[in-house]
Amino acid sequence: MLLEVKGLCVNYGHIEAVRDITFDVPEGSITTLIGANGAGKSTTLKTLSGLRKVRAGQVIFDGTDITHAAPYDRVKMGISQSPEGRGCFPGMTVRENLDMGAYVRTDRKSAAYNQDMERVLELFPRLEERIEQAAGTLSGGEQQMLAIGRALMARPRLILLDEPSMGLAPKLIQQIFSIIDEINDQGTTVLLVEQNAAQALKRADDAHILETGEIVRSGTGAELAGDESVKAAYLGGNI
C-alpha cells in the first residue's frame, strides 16, 4: 500500500473540516474522492501535502509515518500536488513554472531531468508551443496542463490532483482525463479529487464519497458508478 490514511481529523479553528477518515491508496492505482462542495476533499489533499496540520490520525507513505513531515520533505519522498485553481506563477514563463516543480531535485542538469521535461512536453504539446510564454497569458485549459506538468517535474510516485477539470470546456475535460490515464499507465499513482463524478468513477480503481468531512461510502469505481443512490446524488441519475 503506497498511502495509508488512518483516522485523519483536520480542523479550521474550531470547525471540523475532516472527521476520522480512513482510506488506502494502492501503488499503481487511481483512487478518487468525490463529494459536494465543502465535503472536505481539498482539505484532505492539502493535509496529505503537509499544508494543513493534523489534529488526530496518521498518514503513512510507503511504510513511513509522515503525519507531521514538512511539505518539502513530502515532495522529496515522492508526493506532489496539482492544486485546485492551478496555482501557476503568472509572471514566469511556462519553462520557469515547470522548473519550479523540480525545485527540490538535485539533478536539474542531468539526463534524467531532461527526460522528465521531455515527458511533460510530450504529454502536453501545447506547453511546448508556449514554452517561453508567460503563464498568466495561457488559457484556463493550458494553465491546468501546466499545473499537472509542474507536479510531474518533481518525479512523484504519488500525484494529488485537485479538481483538474474545473472550469474547462467538455472537449478539454476529455483531454485532461485521457492524460491522467496516461500518467497512471506510465507508473504514477493518482489520488484524484473531482466534482465530475462520472469521469472520476469511470477510471477509478477505488473510490470514496465524502459528506461533511466524513467518508460515507467506499468501493470500486465501477461499484459506486452502478449504485442507484450514488447515481441519483452525484451523477444526475446516470453515468
Image (cartoon, rainbow, N blue to C red):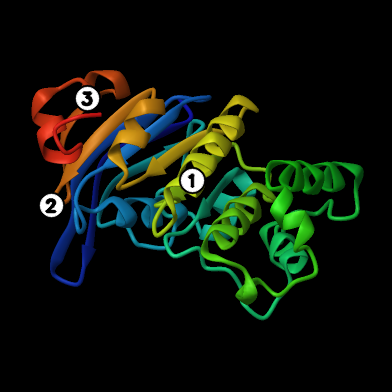
Residue type of the residue flagged with mark 3: Leu
Q: Position of residue 124 (x, y in %)?
A: 68, 47
Name the side, left or right, on which 80 lies relative to 83. right
Q: Where is residue 137 in the image (x, y as percent from the top left)?
A: 63, 75
Q: Residue 171 carries which label?
A: 1
Name the side, left or right, on which 108 lies relative to 20. right
Q: How far apart are marks 2 and 1 (CA)?
A: 31 Å
* Residue at the farthest bottom position: 91
Residue type of the residue flagged with mark 1: Lys
Check the image and report above or below for 139 versus 8: below
Q: N-terminal of the two: label 1 or label 3?
A: 1
Question: What residue is shown with label 3?
Answer: 224
Name the side, left or right, on which 136 lies relative to 103. left
Q: Residue at x 31, y 24 (%)?
A: 221
Disc 2 + disc 3, Cβ < 8 Å: no
Q: Which of marks 1 and 3 is in front?
A: 1
Residue at disc 2, secondary structure: loop
Q: Residue 212 carries which label?
A: 2
Based on the displayed image, in which of its 4 quarters is residue 220 positioned? top left
Q: Which residue is drawn at 51% across and 59% down?
A: 70
Crowding around mark 2 (Cα neighbors within 10 Å: few <14, some 14 to 19, many 20+) is some
Check the image and report above or below for 200 versus 11: above
Q: N-terminal of the two: label 2 or label 1?
A: 1
Residue at disc 3, secondary structure: helix
Q: Residue at x 83, y 41 (%)?
A: 115
Name the side, left or right, on which 40 lies relative to 129. left
Quadrant the C terminus occupies: top left
Q: Where is residue 150 in the image (x, y as percent from the top left)?
A: 64, 56
Q: Distance between the residues labelled 2 and 3?
A: 19 Å
Residue type of the residue flagged with mark 2: Thr
Residue at disc 1, secondary structure: helix
Crowding around mark 3 (Cα neighbors within 10 Å: few <14, some 14 to 19, many 20+) is many
